[in-house]
Amino acid sequence: MNTTELKEQLQLIQSKNYAADEVEHPYELALHMLQHIGSTDPVLRDELIYVTFTTWIGQGIFSEEQLRVLLHKAMDDQHLFYGIGENGMDSVFTRAFSVLLLPPILNMDRQRNFLIKADIEAIHHRLTTYLKEEKDVRGYVNEKGWAHAPAHASDAVEDLAQSPYMDETALRELLDSLAVKITDSSAVYIHDEDQRIAHAVVTIVRRKLLNRSDLAAWIDGLEQACIDQTGERSYVEISRISMNVRVFLQTLYLVIRKEEQDPFPMVRELVLNALEKE
């Protein structure tokens, strides 16, 4: 099946409200969709493949073993790490939409509890590594649609952080990997990345496993990234980092401004103190 045939079949499925009983072998079609998840056709990639995946996963169309296979395929070197390190290339669509398959699978796991500790640890390792190694932070790409890797990965972090297998150390590592994206020096975020990252951070904080010193050190790390301590960064790069950090902290403050349960009052204080130094 080529991309034209796949697009036509998925459009037909879409027209029938994604009814899987209209498809003879939904799982085989899912594996074929996964092969084309990085298509540069935004309709095929975003509106058809991604939406069909999330709808069918949410409807419980796939067995637990099929979901596990789809999960590990999405995280392999041909998907989540396909062309990793490239910037400005079409490979970003494969990576960014592969990581976006993690949230619906993790959400289904919260309902069925089918992923074992080793699965969650594998997700944690691959996701934190991906966040540190992804260099392409473009949001919307003309004619090709959304890449949005930082936002998509943050959505995955938000879901992963809810797993009971994520302990204090694992949550700190998730925060550290998000910090890499917040302090990226290659671009100023303009496509709501700050909101998506902030919601991931809030979910981590809501686990109540991190103490004040953990969170204070993390916020201090963001502040320190705005200072050119080595002389290796240009003025423009430092300006981008400072802008991204400031906007993120402002957004985080707004997101948690009405949260009264612990430890949010303490986090608000830390964030406000950081903003007052700007």
Image (tube, helix red, strand yellow):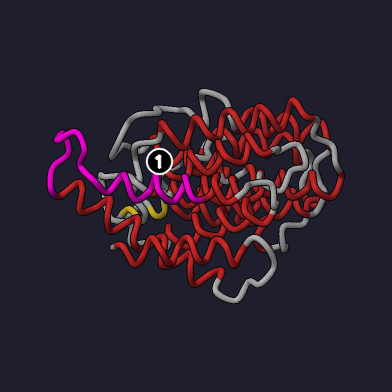
Residue 34 spot, x, y in % from top left? 59, 36
Q: Is residue 237 left or right of residue 205?
A: left
Q: Secondary structure at mark 1?
A: helix
Residue that appears at 32% across and 45% down: 224
Residue 169 falls in image quadrant: top right
- What percent of the width, then of the height, locates residue 92? 40, 39
Q: Compared with residue 87, is residue 244 higher up or lower down, i.e. above or below?
A: below
Give the number of callouts: 1
Task: Indicate whether 254 appears above or below 29.
Answer: below
Q: Report whether 20 appears left or right of 126.
A: right
- Residue in the image at 40% along x and 41% along y: 180
Q: Position of residue 165 (x, y in %)?
A: 75, 36
Q: Residue 217: horizontal and vertical position, in percent?
A: 47, 45
Left or right of residue 215: residue 124: right
Residue marked by disc 1: 180
Does residue 219 belong to the magenta stretch? yes
Q: In terms of image quadrants, where is residue 249?
A: bottom left
Can residue 208 be seen by looking at this rendering? yes
> Counting other residues with Cα less than 10 Å from the Cα at mark 1, is it few (<14), some (14-19), or many (20 or more)?
some
Indicate left or right for 252 with 106 as reference. Answer: left
The residue depicted at 36 percent of the width and 65 percent of the height is 275
Q: Looking at the figure, which quarter contains the C terminus?
A: bottom left
Residue at the front extreme of this rendering: 213
Q: Is residue 49 magenta?
A: no
Report if residue 53 is visible in the image: no
Q: Specify the quadrant of the image occupied by residue 67.
A: top right
**From this viewpoint, which residue is outermost toward the bottom?**
258
The residues colored magenta run 216-235
Q: Amino acid at mark 1?
A: Val
Question: In which quadrant of the rendered image does the N terminus lie?
Answer: top right
Q: Residue at x 20, y 42 (%)?
A: 228
Frontmost residue, 114 versus 231? 231
